[in-house]
Every structure is written in C-alpha cells, then in structure tokens.
Image (cartoon, rainbow, N blue to C red):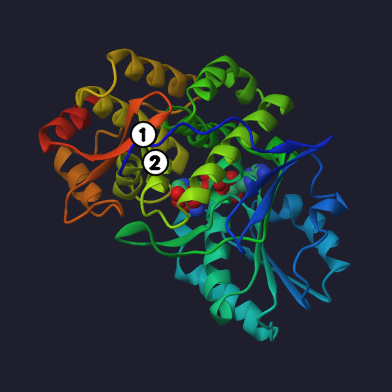
Amino acid sequence: MNANPSCPAGTGTAAVDRRLVPITLDERSYDIHIGRGLLADDRSWDGLPKARCALVVSNETVAPLYLEAVTARLRGRYAQVLSVVLPDGEAYKGWDAIERIASTLLQAAADRKTVLFALGGGVIGDMTGFAAAIYMRGVPFVQIPTTLLAQVDSSVGGKTAINHVLGKNMLGAFYQPQRVIADLDTLKTLPDRELSAGLAEVIKYGPIADAEFLCWLEQHVDALRARDPESLAQAVQRSCEIKAWVVGQDERESGLRAILNFGHTFGHAIETGLGYGEWLHGEAVGCGMVMASDLSVRMGLMPAEFLARMTSLITRAGLPVKAPATLDVDRFMALMRVDKKAEDGEIRFVLIERLGRAVMRGAPDALVAEVIRQHCA
Ligand code: NAD
Ligand code: GLY
C-alpha cells in the first residue's frame, strides 16, 4: 500500500449544539450527527426512511438507560415500534443474536422497508448492522452509538460483523447506515474503563492521519478522561472527520482503509487469545498500538522517541501497555496469521512512517518476536 497523505483540516460543520460530519459515498452517503441532547431533538429523527415498522436493538445495560427515549421519538414516525434487548457483551456477538433479531422481525411480519436502530456500543452496532445487511437481503439501519468507541469508530463507515470462535469479526458485510446519531450526553453513564477503551480508537487517528491531533490529544487527555463536554465534542468530531476522509476514499478496504487498523493486528491476537470479553477491544488496541509503534521503530521508520510518546499517551489514557504473559510468542504469531490483513500466511502490520502517515508492511518474524517479548507482562 502506498503512503497516505495526512488528512486535511476539518470538514464538519458546527451548528449551535449539533455538528454534522458527512460521509461521502455516492448514493450511500450520510451524515454523522454529533452533539448533546440529540436523542430528544426532532432534527435527529427527521428525514429518516419511511416505513411501517422500526426495530430498536439494544442490550440489557443500555436499554434501561435510553430505550424509552428512543422509542418515544420513533412512535410518532413508525406505526409499529419493536425492540430486542440482547445480553450484554462481546461473548454474545454471534449467530444467536442475529437469530433473535431475525425472529423478532419475522414474527412481526416486518417487510423489507423496516428500519433497524442500533442503540448501544460497538457490539450492538456491528450485530445490528449485519442483521440489517442480511434481513430480506438488506433493510435500512441507523446507528445510535452510546460508547465513545462506537461514536468515534465502529458506528461510522459500514463495517458490520459477528465473531466466530476461531476469529474476531470473521463473519460480516460492508453495509452503510442511513445516519449516525452520536449523542454525547449518553457518555455520562459510561464506565471509566469503557471511556478509556474509546480513547484508544481516538488516539489512533493522530499517528495515522493527523500529527496536530496527536499534540491536541496530549494536551487534552486529562480533560477527556474528566468528560469535559467541549473536549469530547472536539475529539469525536475530529475522529469522525478523519474516518470519513479514509472511508470516502476506500470504502471496502482495498488499500488506505487498512490504516484504521493501527494496533489492531497485535490487539486482535490479545482479544482472541484471552477469550472475547477478558480485555476490552479498546484496551487490546491500546496495547497493540504500543507494540506496533515499537515495530515501527525497530523497522527503522520512526525514532525511539515515538514509542516513548505513544506509551506515555496510552498510559495517561488509562490503558494497558503490557500484553498478558499468558500469550507467548508462538501463540501470538499463530493468532496474527488469521488476521484479515494477512496475505498467504504473511502477517501485515500497519506501521507509522512519519507522524500522520501510516504504511502497510510485512515484518521479519524475528523482529515481531522481539516486540512480543518486550511487551508481554
Ligand atoms: P460494547 O458495545 O461492548 O460496549 C461497552 C460496554 O458499555 C457494554 O457493557 C455496554 O453495554 C456498555 N454501554 C454502552 N453504552 C453505554 C452507556 N452510554 N452507558 C453505560 N454503559 C454503556 O463495546 P464498544 O467498545 O462500544 O465496542 C467494541 C466492539 O466494536 C467490538 O466488538 C469491536 O470489534 C467493534 N468495533 C467495530 C468497528 C467497526 O468498524 N465496525 C470498529 C471498532 C470496533
Ligand atoms: N475500525 C476499522 C475500520 O472501520 O475500518
């Protein structure tokens, strides 16, 4: 893959309390709405596809907090408003959830215009998107992300998936939502550990696409952990702008989009190796970014200070920087060989070649092994 130019400065627009970031993909284009109080605001819901039936998919944690607020808005717009409340957790991101969604739709004779609403974090968003992609060969869906990770990454760009016991996100589809409604107020109820996990996906945008954003994050990481509303709004907007810029050029990851997986090759190995749910996805990505930064240094692409800088920021974000000792080099390598970016058994890594620019490269096994040994607790 060729080096990517850095992402240009902001493309989003800020209204009084609502920022709009467009995703430009021909007839699949849509807006990301970012702001406070969006669930209660008609402008979030106006102009969505018309249908008889809407189905809100959520989980046992999020539904008691926000399901009523969402269904109240939908009741005036759809004759039939259904909901499915799934068990909470990465361990439930599988076929059973898809069956539950499909059964609810079929029992209600929901037709192919039915609109699905994903209310929750990335797990709910990925599963609902996948269900929307395959129900009657595709029905419209809307993302209502309620975690920081989902607001800055998983709800945007149309990757949908469920897990297989042999690999994370191995079954899925590219399928774009009609809209993303990222209400920053929902982050008030998010546990601290989940907020930190979301910060991992925010941090990745700096080294891969925007060196200035990396500096901004170093200055604002404490404010972000304290949930300062303006800092959160800025972080979500800039993250979405960068993601929109990448996805707009490479929707189906034939090249550039792979840079969004900085830290994920090591990170997915941690998640799969430990069993889904032991470490949070963002925690694994945080540690994976430290390992990928080290590999960038060992490959001669970046100076040693880069690793120190990334380790410091990721630590300050409240994320682990040491991989679990239970994963040895052989296990790590075996897990990374089933990564979706692997080609003919060769592991491919997203590496940083200068701040704001990422490249996709293979790396000698010996160097990768050194990185694993260095960063296992
Ligand atoms: P998650 O969906 O499991 O949510 C984290 C936890 O927070 C859950 O317990 C959830 O119930 C709870 N929660 C959600 N919103 C809350 C709120 N407002 N208040 C209180 N609790 C709340 O995890 P996540 O970090 O949002 O997403 C991780 C998933 O996203 C992984 O499955 C990962 O593979 C996927 N992902 C997908 C993409 C993509 O492009 N599609 C990108 C990154 C990650
Ligand atoms: N989260 C990686 C991607 O959307 O491509």
* 19 is higher (above) or lower (below) than 142: above
User: Which dot marks residue 358?
Assistant: 1
Q: Is disc 2's CB within 8 Å of ligand 2?
A: no
Image spot of residue 241 (x, y percent): 59, 39
- Image vertical order of residue 134 relative to residue 365, above or below: below
Residue 183: horizontal and vertical position, in percent? 73, 43
- Residue 262 in sight in this render: yes
Amino acid, disc 1: Ala
- Quarter holding the N terminus is top left
Q: Is residue 280 visible?
A: no
Query: Residue 255, percent across and down?
Result: 36, 49
Q: Residue at x 28, y 15 (%)?
A: 304
Question: Furthest-left residue in view?
Answer: 366
Residue 28: image quadrant is: bottom right
In the image: residue 211, left or right of residue 342: right
Q: Secondary structure at mark 1?
A: strand
Seen at 43% across and 33% down, the residue is 5
Q: For this view, does 115 lie left or right of residue 152?
A: right
For mark 2, give the secondary structure.
Answer: helix
* Cβ at disc 1 under 8 Å from ligand 2: no
Front position in the image: 193 or 26? 26
Q: Amino acid at mark 2?
A: Ile
Q: Could you tell me how far apart the alpha carbons at marks 2 and 1 are, in whole angstroms?
A: 6 Å
User: What residue did someone put label 2 on?
Assistant: 259
Q: Quadrant of residue 227?
A: top right
What is the x, y in percent for residue 344? Answer: 17, 56
Q: Nearer the viewer, residue 146 or 363?
A: 363
